[in-house]
Amino acid sequence: MAGKTVPQGVTMLRWCAHVGRRAIRGLSRWVAFAPTAPLGDLPAAAAAVREPPPSGGGLAYRLKAWPELPPSLQTAEVYRVLSFMSLRPVRLSWMVSSSRLSAEAARQLMGVLDATHSVEVIDLSRFTESR
């Protein structure tokens, strides 16, 4: 619609109403077909936002570089975890509890990340408060 002029014999107000109706109709169709997730199936990142920041000892892992993954780890859930790890450090326990990764898959992923030097290991005990 960009660049079109008002047709002859049509008032500007009618033309704006026509363009507005077409835009709303197109947006309504797009929203009707937009994929949605049921509430019980929210991505792991949304669940992690509610999780308090890590405290106490232990290790957290932050993604430094995207690794080449073996075919067994090329799943949507692994890529979700890696995406979240690229934003902030996560614990191994978070990977298992807040994603659909099994403990074995999380350990296998960490092995690949460690072998390819794609992960930064952070010792959380450095950040505990001395009382």
Image (cartoon, rainbow, N blue to C red):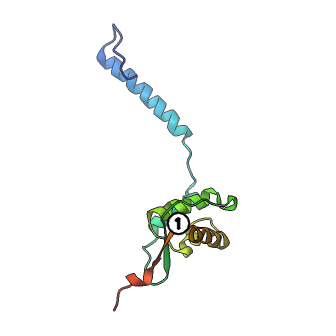
- Tell me residue 43's x, y (percent): 54, 59
- The three-letter amino acid code for the residue at tag 1 is Ser
- Tell me residue 26's x, y (percent): 48, 30
Q: Residue at 57% across / 58% down in the picture?
A: 79
Q: Height in image: 125 above or below 41?
A: below
- Tell me residue 128's x, y (percent): 39, 84
Res 82 quadrant in image: bottom right
Q: Residue furthest bottom?
A: 131
- Image quarter of the C terminus: bottom left
Mark 1 residue element: loop
- Image quarter of the N terminus: top left
Q: Height in image: 10 above or below 32?
A: above
Please state which of residues 71 and 103 is positioned toward the viewer in this rendering: 71
Please state which of residues 58 and 25 is positioned toward the viewer in this rendering: 58
Q: Residue at 50% across / 61% down in the picture?
A: 65
Q: Residue at 40% across / 83% down in the picture?
A: 126
User: Mark 1: few, some, or many residues within 10 Å (few <14, many ≥20)?
Assistant: some
Residue named by callout 1: 118
Please state which of residues 69 and 131 is positioned toward the viewer in this rendering: 69
Q: Height in image: 104 above or below 22?
A: below
Please state which of residues 30 and 128 is positioned toward the viewer in this rendering: 128
Q: Residue furthest left?
A: 12
Res 70 quadrant in image: bottom right
